[in-house]
């Protein structure tokens, strides 16, 4: 099986692809409509028809250029996530500590600024508190 990258796929969309997407959207709408119209047939029939319609819509979408582009994007994303170097648990805990410390210091700083401005404005300028 040949791998497809996003660079291998042309962005020109054909009329057939647009028709596939419209049919896919119609299948989704029909699936939801059938779910409500088949209320008297029972839950199994309702869900079966809706799941089949959604599966057909997904299959039709994936058969279009948009679907092929999406699949190529997903493959490249998986490749990129495999390249990520994850931090060790020790580094993770250290960075978490730094973040919590920074948040604590900023909270204290903002509290002090708020109380200072409150005292300046309400006590000294307006004289509301005595």
Image: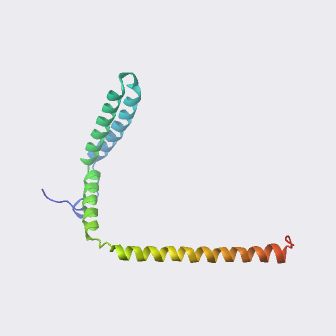
Q: Position of residue 126 (x, y in %)?
A: 85, 73
- Check the image and report above or below for 75 versus 59: below
- Residue 10 seen in render: no
Q: Give the camera-side residue of 115 and 65.
A: 115
The count of marks equals 0
Outermost residue to the top: 40
Q: Position of residue 81 (x, y in %)?
A: 28, 66
- Residue 22 seen in render: yes
The quarter of the rendered structure image containing the C terminus is bottom right
Query: Residue at left 29%, top 73%?
Result: 85
Q: Locate residue 37: give its quadrant.
A: top left
Q: Name the colour scheme.
A: rainbow
The answer to whether 35 appears left or right of 80 in the picture is right
Q: Locate residue 109: give its quadrant.
A: bottom right
Query: Residue at left 69%, top 73%?
Result: 114
Q: Position of residue 29 (x, y in %)?
A: 38, 36
- Check the image and report above or below for 20 versus 103: above
Q: Give the camera-side residue of 20 and 47.
A: 47
The quarter of the rendered structure image containing the N terminus is bottom left
- Check the image and report above or below for 63 versus 6: above
Query: Residue at left 37%, top 77%?
Result: 91
Q: Locate residue 115: give its quadrant.
A: bottom right
Q: Give the camera-side residue of 129 and 40.
A: 129
């Amino acid at each position: 099986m040949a791998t497809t990258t996003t660079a291998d796929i042309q962005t020109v969309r054909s009329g057939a692809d647009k028709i596939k997407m419209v049919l896919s959207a119609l299948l989704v709408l029909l699936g939801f409509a059938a779910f409500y119209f088949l209320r008297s047939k029972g839950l199994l029939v309702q869900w079966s028809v809706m799941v089949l319609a959604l599966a057909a819509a997904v299959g039709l979408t994936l058969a279009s250029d948009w679907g092929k582009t999406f699949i190529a994007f997903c493959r490249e994303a998986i490749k990129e996530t495999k390249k990520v170097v994850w931090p060790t648990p020790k580094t993770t805990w250290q960075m978490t500590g730094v973040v919590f410390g920074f948040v604590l210091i900023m909270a204290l700083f903002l509290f002090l600024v708020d109380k200072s401005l409150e005292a300046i404005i309400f006590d000294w300028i307006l004289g509301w508190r005595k």
